[in-house]
Image (tube, grey):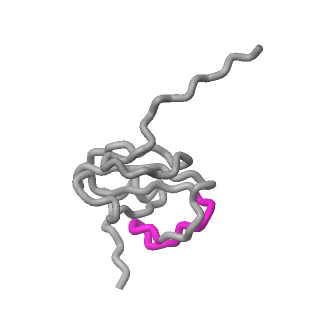
Amino acid sequence: MPRRNKPTSRARFVDRGEPRDPGLGFEERESGADGEWLVRPISGQAATKTYRCPGCDHEIAPGVPHVVAWSADGRVEERRHWHRPCWNSRGQRRITRRR
């Protein structure tokens, strides 16, 4: 009989205790020159809406894997959806703001 992997005991809640979809990734704390951030990867299956990336000002289409980031000392409502390369290179360019 094949061995079954035991489920991990990772929490299914964000730091503020709000329940969320277990199909989404777990957030990680990242430090950078621009401060402390909570970053959550979003799989292509979980990406069901169109978002606009603040790094390049292009759309993130449904089905495209990306990340969601928000300030570690901010509110979850301030989170933004980024393309992974845009998030990784955010220190080399300015954030684009739509008018």
- How many numbered markers are drawn? 0
Residue 95 vs residue 84: left or right?
left
Q: Is residue 31 magenta?
A: no
Foreground residue among 28 and 5: 5
Location of residue 99 in the rendering, given as x and y in whole percent from the top left corner: 35, 85
Q: Residue at x 43, y 59 (%)?
A: 86
3 vs 37: above or below: above
Q: Position of residue 8 (x, y in %)?
A: 51, 29
Q: Position of residue 58 (x, y in %)?
A: 49, 72
For residue 3, which quarter of the picture?
top right
Farthest residue, direction top:
1
Tell whether position 63 is magenta: yes
Q: Is residue 61 above or below residue 29?
A: below
Picture residue at 53% right of the left edge, 67% below the top: 60
Occupied quadrant, residue 30:
top left
- Give the residue displayed 44% in from the left and 62% down from the top: 81
Q: Position of residue 32 (x, y in %)?
A: 26, 48
Q: Front-most of 9 and 25?
A: 9
Q: Seen from this angle, which residue lies furthest bottom?
A: 99
| Residue under the image location 31 percent in, 50 percent down | 16
Main structural element of the magenta stretch: helix, strand or loop? loop
Q: Seen in the image, is 66 located left or right of residue 29?
A: right
Give the magenta-colored segment's residue range. 52-64
Q: Split into 4 quadrants, where in the image is the N terminus?
A: top right
Most foreground residue, 53 or 76: 76
